Image (tube, rainbow, N blue to C red):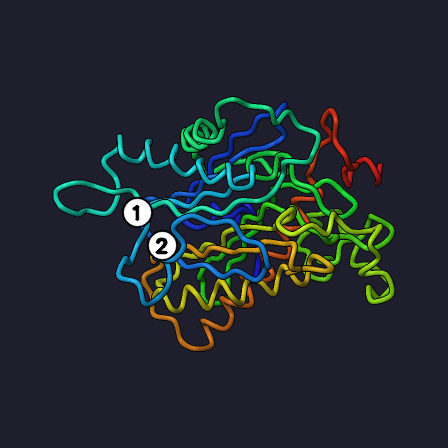
Amino acid sequence: MTPGPKNLITDIAGIMVGNAQDQRLKSGVTVLRAAQRFTAAYAVMGGAPGTRETDLLEPDKSLQQIDALVLSGGSAYGLDAASGVVERLRVQQAGFAVAGTQVPIVPAAILFDLNNGGEKEWALSPYPALGRQAFDDLSAEFQMGSVGAGCGATTGRLKGGLGSASFILSNGIRVGAIMAVNAVGNATGEDLRRFWAGPFEANGEFGGLGGPQASPQPHAFRLKSLGPLVEGENTTIGIVATDASLSKAAAKRLAISAHDGVARALIPSHMPQDGDLIFTAATGSAQRQLRPTDMAELCHGASLCVARAIARAIYHAEKAPNDRLPTWQDCNR
């Protein structure tokens, strides 16, 4: 496996990502769309998720393809970002054809960033507008760090962010991940320098320092090293995309396997206070049948992309006024 040309989720043909953020609010929205409607699934491993339109992604539900995916800050308020995306898609007459009209299908997941030092006293929710702005920003190129859904994200000891990574598998299939990291746990060891995802790093993409030397077990659950252990206040959410052609059941398996990357990159992870969720998006543009060994490599590659994307999110986070936590860059100049 080798990283794609951009080392972003947009290395999958047709995939575009848009970000919008408000630095005073310390929150934002990330939108993913493909050139055509695509197969999607999701898996939740955290104890406190916040979602919209995820039930219809289950393999036993009738709908086969969707129009876009949304990751947002803002806790439950952020679910309104999907409404802004739906508005844009409706203007384009995109969506599920039913009864002579088009109904855009846009599942969403949110993270909690309401206590990060941003201005939260709004009279009108800013998230529908941020959803529209993120849709208008859709492109094959995008920044990482303190942007989009990762704008105001935090981890146990460092500022969080938005990260992405990709791989081209041995059979030519492509897989990529985009992750908004707002975890109870930590992406680095005690020194705040070396990432737990270090063994999976490609081409020095987050510093080339390797993994922490010490075992994580002695200090992994020290409360002073973690984010607030309050149910629903932390979440790592993301999307894994591939050009493979997958059924909804296979896409579900891919989402489940991708969570291994969360556990590799964040210690601890999948806590009751986290809402950890991963969507999968399968475009089918590669137009080839997957053998069982191909599916296994795809699942493994997805998990490694997730781990790398998490580390890159922290690595690229930028300092902003009123931050509660330092950035990785602040601690490692």
Residue type pointed to by label 2:
Thr
Q: Are marks 1 and 2 in contact (CB under 8 Å)?
A: yes
Residue 206 position, x and y percent, is 71, 47
Residue drawn at 53 percent across, 67 percent down: 257
Q: Residue at x 53, y 36 (%)?
A: 142
Tell me the CA gap for discs 1 and 2. Answer: 8 Å
Left or right: 24 in relation to 227: left
Numbered label attached to residue 83 = none
Local SS, label 1 = loop
Seen from this angle, which residue lies furthest bottom?
292
Quarter the N terminus occupies: bottom right
> The residue under label 1 is which amino acid type?
Gln
Q: Report the residue at 30% width, 47% height from top.
A: 36
Mark sitting earlier along the chain (1/2): 1
| 62 relative to 14 in the view: left or right | left
Q: Position of residue 278 (x, y in %)?
A: 51, 56
> In the rendered image, which quarter contains the C terminus?
top right
**Can you tell which quarter of the image residue 68 is in?**
top left
Kindly identify which residue carries mark 1.
36
Residue 122 placed where, x, y %? 55, 23
* Residue 283: mark: 2
Choose between 2 and 254: the one closer to the eye.
254
The correct choice, above or below, for 102 with respect to 248 in the image is above
Quadrant housing residue 320? top right
Q: Secondary structure at mark 2?
A: loop
Single out the residue that lies furthest toward the left. 100
Position of residue 189 relative to residue 328, above or below, is below
